[in-house]
């Protein structure tokens, strides 16, 4: 990778890590459904200028419902109900574990020995984190947050079917496909009057946070990530995502004074190590078919 591309990959990881902090700030003023709706409504603005990519509506909606709507709504609910931001950033990255596991079922992809070891190590880390649940946040909040990496992984596999389309256009329309049902959900769960009242009473910090989440963390960062994946192999790009939980945890520690007990910290490090083994392991070269 060129130095400029390495810089972009690191920049995206930093943006996503800081995005967890921005989400927490926005959730201090907005309910989870409204915050997530605004996130995608802002990120969907480019749909006014770009045409829908050549992807069927059923596939577009399926990718949007998992990769975006399900992932980020579960994140918002988990963080809003007390899951620490740094811990949330680690749990979400466990999507790598579920992606490899689901690929075995969906595509018959046999993981390498190193990937199996990585899955085992990451699973042990998640169990260690589970041992700390119930002290500063509820089991229910943790269960809802665990939905995020699971649907994230499903979205990753569905995204494979959207080939040869402009990434920026695709992500913009995925955001639109998430914003529409989320708007209806917000009206049903929060009510029009309370939602409007929350919007009118947002502080400058809240407004800046939601703009950063929608325009930068969702629209720009995903576009840059898509470009990197288009120009380079996944093995070159995806490992940079390992920086996300470190940035998220460090930023949360600075912004909110978040601290981790020995068991939780050990679990978080174990999860990241397991993910690193999975992402950095090399697949054996495919055996060419006989003539």
Image: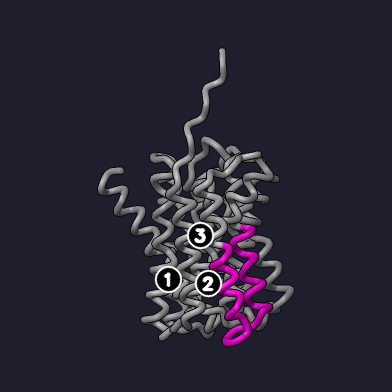
Q: Which residue is mark 2?
A: 88
Q: Position of residue 141 (x, y in %)?
A: 64, 77
Q: Nearer the viewer, residue 258 or 172?
A: 258
Residue bearing the label numbered 1:
248
Position of 56 relative to 62 (above/below): above
Is 146 contained in the magenta span? Answer: yes
Eyeballing the image, is 285 above or below 111? Answer: above
**Residues under labels 2 and 1: Cα distance?**
8 Å
Circle 3 SS class: helix
Q: Which numbered disc, 3 or 1, marks the residue that appears first in the sequence?
A: 3
Q: Residue furthest top?
A: 291
Which corner quadrant holds the N terminus? top left
**Which color scheme does this rendered protein use?**
one colour
> Which region is colored magenta?
123-151
Residue 194 spot, x, y in % from top left: 65, 83
Which residue lies at the image location 48% right of the left edge and 39% below the top edge?
Answer: 283
Left or right of residue 95: residue 252:
left
Q: Is residue 252 left or right of residue 180?
A: left
């Amino acid at each position: 990778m060129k130095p400029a591309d390495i810089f972009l990959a690191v920049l995206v990881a930093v943006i996503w890590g800081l995005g967890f902090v921005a989400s927490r700030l926005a959730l201090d003023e907005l309910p989870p459904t409204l915050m997530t709706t605004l996130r995608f409504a802002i990120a969907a603005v480019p749909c006014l200028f770009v045409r829908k990519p050549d992807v069927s509506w059923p596939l577009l909606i399926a990718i949007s419902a998992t990769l975006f709507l399900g992932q980020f709504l579960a994140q918002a609910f988990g963080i809003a109900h007390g899951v620490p931001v740094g811990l949330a950033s680690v749990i979400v990255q466990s999507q790598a574990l579920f992606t490899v596991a689901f690929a075995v079922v969906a595509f018959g992809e046999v993981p390498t020995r190193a990937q199996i070891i990585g899955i085992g190590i990451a699973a042990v880390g998640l169990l260690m984190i589970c041992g700390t649940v119930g002290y500063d946040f509820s089991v229910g909040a943790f269960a809802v947050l665990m939905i995020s990496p699971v649907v994230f992984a499903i979205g990753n596999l569905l995204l494979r079917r959207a080939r040869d389309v402009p990434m920026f256009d695709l992500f913009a329309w995925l955001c639109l496909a998430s914003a529409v049902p989320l708007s209806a959900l917000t009206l049903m769960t929060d009510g029009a009057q309370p939602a409007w009242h929350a919007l009118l009473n947002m502080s400058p910090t809240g407004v800046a946070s939601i703009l950063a989440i929608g325009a930068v963390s969702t629209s720009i960062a995903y576009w840059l990530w898509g470009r990197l994946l288009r120009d380079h192999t996944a093995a070159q790009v995806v490992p940079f995502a390992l920086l996300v939980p470190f940035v998220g945890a460090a930023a949360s520690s600075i912004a909110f004074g978040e601290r981790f007990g020995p068991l939780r910290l050990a679990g978080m490090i174990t999860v990241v190590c397991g993910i690193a083994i999975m992402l950095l392991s090399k697949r054996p070269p495919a055996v060419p078919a006989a003539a």
